[in-house]
Image (cartoon, rainbow, N blue to C red):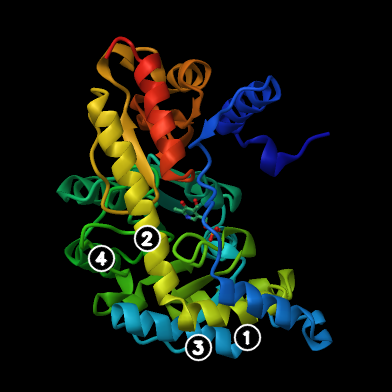
């Protein structure tokens, strides 16, 4: 049978690594898994308690509302105000989504169609490429950077017909960990006004930042709400990945369009999850700080350990990843073969950079999803395996 929309999707590169990892584990190997960015830190105890309590109330077993409970949207707006000084109207400028990923995917359905163009970062978190692609749009990749080279390339794209209707970006960036300041967003918002595109900012790592760096929301820029929306999620900062709770905030026309589509597609997240998420947003700032500190300690163990091994890596200021250039003596083999070697010889799983786009092939991505002790063990395994360093 033919499945026209999905037959065009390339095979999932990470599947190969996963398969090899499973085989090694089945053979009794202890593999340290720093591949998939699946957070291992528990969600906050009071949030879990609230979920249990709310789940016991039969009133919460019914369909909920697809755009999210009013108090949930208010809690998200309140957090934006506390954290970024951005005022959001919970009724018109906030919609709950089933994580950032679903929000982004369906948002692109309402924003683009065949004949439209979307600009995405290169390398890229896969859904940034496939969400516009699945909606039928032409996808153009612009190398991600925090400096003027990004805007020079974007200028080239807006000069080319058909002009992009949407520009997707995400900072702190997965996989490269590139971070930007407010000046970057000021320039992007100015370009969006001038050229008439909508900016979709995936802010998945809003709460995962280190060393005094605080990632800005694009909505802090004056006039941003006219040309931008932002995806915010409890997945990483609140360590609530499996709960699937996110938000799309900002431009009210885009939010209304997404709300209309979602009213046809879903009845909202299970209500106890929404109720517990209100607690997370209103009372979770300390937990978010603990999550952040945990990732920071892991980052330090990994960066310091790899550097001692002779593997030069930069210390990221945000995200839960390390984007590591493959060391020179191994560069030629490319990221997939290097990843499989690390798995076989160091017993460490990472993500091959090629999975994020062709320019990623010179790198591998470590996710900080095992504890410090296990990360130290990974560093020792890597030291033994990379004997050409
Ligand atoms: C850039 C980016 N966006 C979105 C997600 C997924 O977020 P959610 O769990 O809210 O769908 C991730 C998770 O790795 C991510 O890295």
Q: Which of 321 and 27 is in front in this view?
A: 27
Q: What percent of the width, then of the height, locates residue 148?
A: 15, 49
> Tags 4 and 3 in contact by the CB under 8 Å rule?
no
Q: What percent of the width, then of the height, locates residue 198?
A: 39, 66
Report crowding for label 3: few under 14, some 14 to 19, many 20 or more residues within 10 A (C-alpha): many
Asked which secondary structure carries label 1, the reply is: loop
Q: Who comes first in sequence, dot 3 or dot 2?
A: 3
Q: Who comes first in sequence, dot 3 or dot 1?
A: 1
Residue occupied by mark 4: 214
> Tags 4 and 1 in contact by the CB under 8 Å rule?
no
The label nearer to you, 4 versus 1, is: 4
The label nearer to you, 2 versus 4, is: 2
As drawn, 195 above or below 384: below
- Residue 101 occupies which quadrant of the picture? bottom right
Residue occupied by mark 2: 292
Image point (33%, 14%), residue name: 330
Q: Does any portion of residue 353 appear in the rendered image?
A: no
> Tags 2 and 1 in contact by the CB under 8 Å rule?
no
As drawn, 96 above or below 146: below
The label nearer to you, 2 versus 1, is: 2
- Marks 2 and 1 sit apart, C-alpha to C-alpha, by 28 Å
Q: Which mark is residue 353?
A: none
Image point (57%, 77%), residue name: 46
Going by the image, does 174 lie left or right of 59? left
Residue occupied by mark 1: 69
Q: Residue furthest front?
A: 373
Residue occupied by mark 3: 74
- Residue 82 occupies which quadrant of the picture? bottom left
Q: Who comes first in sequence, dot 2 or dot 4?
A: 4
């Amino acid at each position: 049978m033919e499945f026209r929309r999905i037959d065009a999707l390339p095979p999932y590169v990470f599947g190969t690594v996963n398969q090899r990892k499973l085989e090694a584990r089945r053979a009794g190997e202890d593999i340290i898994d720093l591949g998939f960015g699946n957070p291992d830190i528990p969600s906050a105890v009071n949030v879990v308690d609230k979920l249990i309590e709310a789940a016991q109330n039969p009133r919460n077993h019914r369909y909920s509302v697809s755009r999210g409970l009013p108090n949930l949207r208010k809690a998200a707006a309140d957090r934006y105000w506390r954290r970024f000084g951005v005022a959001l109207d919970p009724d018109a400028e906030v919609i709950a989504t089933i994580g950032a990923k679903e929000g982004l995917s369906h948002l692109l359905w309402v924003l683009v169609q065949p004949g439209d163009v979307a600009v995405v970062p290169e390398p890229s978190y896969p859904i940034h490429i496939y969400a516009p692609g699945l909606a039928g749009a032409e996808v153009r990749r612009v190398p991600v950077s925090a400096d003027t080279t990004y805007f020079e390339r974007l200028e080239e794209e807006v000069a080319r017909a058909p002009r992009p209707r949407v520009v997707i970006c995400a900072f702190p960036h997965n996989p490269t960990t590139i971070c930007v300041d407010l000046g970057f967003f000021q320039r992007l918002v100015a370009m969006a006004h001038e050229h008439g595109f909508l900016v979709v900012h995936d802010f998945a790592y809003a709460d995962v930042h280190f060393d005094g760096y605080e990632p800005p929301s694009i909505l802090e820029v004056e006039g941003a709400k006219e040309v931008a929306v932002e995806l915010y999620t409890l997945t990483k900062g609140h360590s609530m990945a499996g709960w699937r709770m996110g938000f799309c905030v900002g431009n009210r026309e885009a939010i209304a369009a997404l709300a209309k589509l979602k009213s046809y597609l879903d009845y909202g997240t299970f209500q106890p999850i929404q109720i517990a998420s209100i607690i997370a947003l209103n009372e979770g700032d300390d937990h978010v700080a603990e999550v952040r500190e945990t990732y920071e300690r892991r980052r330090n163990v990994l960066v310091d350990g790899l550097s001692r091994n002779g593997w030069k890596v930069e210390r990221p200021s945000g995200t839960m990843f390390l984007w590591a250039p493959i060391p020179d003596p191994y560069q030629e083999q490319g990221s997939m073969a290097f990843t499989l070697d690390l798995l076989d010889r160091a017993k460490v799983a990472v993500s091959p950079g090629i999975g994020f786009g062709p320019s990623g092939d010179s790198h591998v991505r470590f996710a900080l999803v095992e504890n410090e002790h296990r990360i130290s063990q990974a560093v020792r395994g890597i030291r033994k395996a990379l004997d050409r360093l």
